[in-house]
Image (cartoon, grey):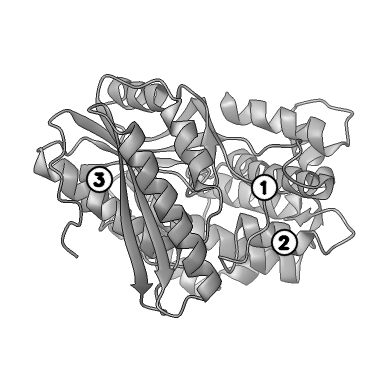
Amino acid sequence: MPPVITDIPTKNIGIVVVIPCYDEPHLENTLFSLLSCTLPPVAVEVLVVINAPANATKEVLEQNNKSLSVAKEFSEKYSNSHLRFYFIENYNLPQKHAGVGLARKIGMDEAAYRFAFVHNLSGLIVCLDADCTCKKNYFLEIYQYFKEQPKCHAASLYFEHPLNGTDFENRIYKVIAEYELHLRYYKQALKWAGFPFAFHTIGSCMAVRAEAYMQQGGMNKRKAGEDFYFLHKHIPLGNFGEINTTCVYPSPRPSHRVPFGTGKTIGRQLLQPNELSTYNLLSFSDLKFFFKQVNDSCFSFSTLPISVQKFIPEKEWQNKLYEFEKNSGSQELFLKRFYLWFDAFKVLKFLHFARESFFTDVPISAAAKELLMSKGVLTESKMIPELLCIYRNLDRT
């Protein structure tokens, strides 16, 4: 679709923050959080896509109208030559595609148009959500990271969910701590297993250069998981970064807006009396053994872990080996082709397969502690908050 914003961007525009907004009662909190940030040497635009499907309920439309009214007033009051706020209103998204993926795409495409207009394809498109806040150095650290890493084309941003306060009931804070620990355990377990693409993929915590965004076909229209699919088009290209010197604070609230993800998981877990469960470390252990064999050029099917043998039929394994060896002039190219095949999607499929057929899920506290011991990090704690603190430190370093 053609660009919507008619204002000409300033010549030194360097960052555009894209925020999808659907049935959001606290958009103003997010805008004020951005307003309080220290500005970088480049101009910044904040682009909010207030959206709804064509069949949206009256209540959703009323909330969207409230958000739009607040947003317009906010923009008129606070926009200036260094920081501008824009709002795209689209209440008629096709029901088949309406969702966070399409809303992000509308905003990110608009950002790409604006960077192309001023011939700044190295400009940064940054994603945030309308229920998030951020640290005051948010803009500065994003700008500085990409300036110091000119080859970096995309990056994930460090995040922390609030673990206490008065905005939510205590049970929600307890559950979000479990869920965040699960996210960090998953990333660290993949890293421990030797998987080269072990990064967080959270929609409110990612940034991409405009040129890379366009080269990889832009954002997808998925109703959920759009961040995972989007970033895993960029991560295998290399030069993917992690910005750990600032922080995004996503909301821990339950949500009905997506079929899976943080909000959905929190809502489901609130109905359960037991601690959140996660993938068994034995599944990652088998992956670790598998990846080591491949890295060491040991390709005998009979020596693969049984879970991997059952997941990959022997004929497929032999065919893939032949294909990779035929088209690779070096070990480096062989491994590149292997991990483009056994990528993050295939890893996830394997973990689901292993869960169903070999290793049942375990409580997140037990899995997280076991992984720490396997990594040589000693801890006696079995408490979620203490374990989460350790994992946050691991991710930051």
The residue that label 2 is drawn on is: 267
Residue 372 picture location, percent across and down: 76, 34
Observer-side mark, 3 or 1, equals: 1
Taking 58 as reference, is 308 above or below it? above
Q: Circle 3 sits on which residue?
A: 212
Q: Which of marks 3 and 1 is nearer the N terminus?
A: 3
At which x and y percent is residue 240?
38, 37
Residue 159 visible in image: yes
Q: Is mark 1 on a helix, strand or loop?
A: loop
Q: Is 194 drawn above or below residue 149 in the view shown?
A: below
Q: What residue type is labelled 3?
A: Ala
Q: Is mark 3 on a helix, strand or loop?
A: helix
Q: Position of residue 139 (x, y in %)?
A: 39, 27
Quadrant of the frame with the C terminus: top right
Instruction: Give the side of residue 242 with respect to residue 267, left or right.
Output: left
Question: What residue lies at 28% left-to-right and 22% top-to-bottom?
Answer: 147
